[in-house]
Structure formats: C-alpha cells, structure tokens
Image: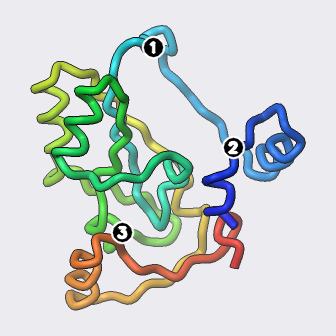
Amino acid sequence: MLFFFMFIPIDHHSKWGRSLSSYFPVTLHVEDINAFQSDRSYIFGYEPHSVLPIGVVALADLTASKKNFTSLLAAGYSCIIVPGGVQETFHMEHSSEIAFLKPRRGFVRIAMEMGLPLVPVFCFGQSDVFKWWKLGGQLYLKFSRALKFTPIYFWGLFGYV
C-alpha cells in the first residue's frame, strides 16, 4: 500500500491527504528557511537509512552513482542522498538510530567540488516506524551488497503487514 501512495499525487487539500497526514503525523523543523534559495541546487544528506528511509521514499529513487548524482546537480536539481546504504541497514538495531558516515564521504567531496551547500537531514524516530526482522552474518552482508539492498521483512504502521 505504501508503494501505491508513491505514485498517486495526494496533497494536504484532498480528503485523502488530510486523513493520511493526521494518521501519519510528521513534524518538519527547519533551522533557517530563509537560507534556502529556490534557484540554487542543494545536497541533502539524509540519515538514518533504517528499513526504509520514510522521509525520502515518495521521491524519485535513483542509483546513487557519481554519474547520476553529478549530472542531476549540474542540471540544477537538488539531491537527497542516504549515505549509509546497505552497510547501515546491516548494523541497524531496534529503538536505536545508526548513522554510518565515516567511510561515506563522496557526496561531501562532490558538494565541495561543485560549490554546493550540503544540508544535514536527520529523521528522529525512524527506527520506531517499523517492526522488522532480518538475517545476520557475513554471507547475508555479501548477498545484500550484491543485490544493492538489504532484504528485510518489515511490518507496522507504514508496513501494512
């Protein structure tokens, strides 16, 4: 059902939009909204990845390759990147937020090279959105890296299972 809503444009003016936003309450805190210019590209570094990065799931999901990333930025688009990836989902724990950033600095380097602002984004409570279960071990990690995602069984408020 979550994927159904990814492709249906629902805004806060529609009856569905009002119902969904009251059932799934989200609060956005922006430090300084006037710091953002509509004619400028930004790189948003989103953490944590968790089971499904709810804050970015409804947006276009592209491969985080350097080629895709730099071409979108050069075309004037802002990009959201979830740097933790498979490694972060492998280390996630219930009721704990895991951020796996140290070896994931490529997006910072690109921001510096292109002279673009880097905006940190953190979704508090991400690990409490779902209940989940996953395998463990090195074989599972290698399998997840080969697939480029971590197979996880999840259920709960946004899981609908």
Q: Which residue is rendered at x = 49% and y = 20% of the image?
A: 31
Residue corresponding to mark 2: 9
Q: Which residue is rendered at x = 63% and y = 76% of the image?
A: 155
- Quadrant assignment, res 49: bottom left
- Front position in the image: 96 or 49: 49
Secondary element at image label 1: loop
- Quadrant assignment, res 115: top left
- Residue furthest to the right in view is 15
Q: Which residue is rendered at x = 44% and y = 63% of the image?
A: 50
Left-right relation of 59 to 104: right
Give the quadrant of the C terminus: bottom right
Dot 1 and dot 3 residues touching (CB under 8 Å) = no
Q: Which residue is rendered at x = 52% and y = 65% of the image?
A: 95
Q: Residue 27 in the image: x percent, y percent? A: 65, 36
Mark sitting on residue 38 = 1
145 shown above or below 105 = below
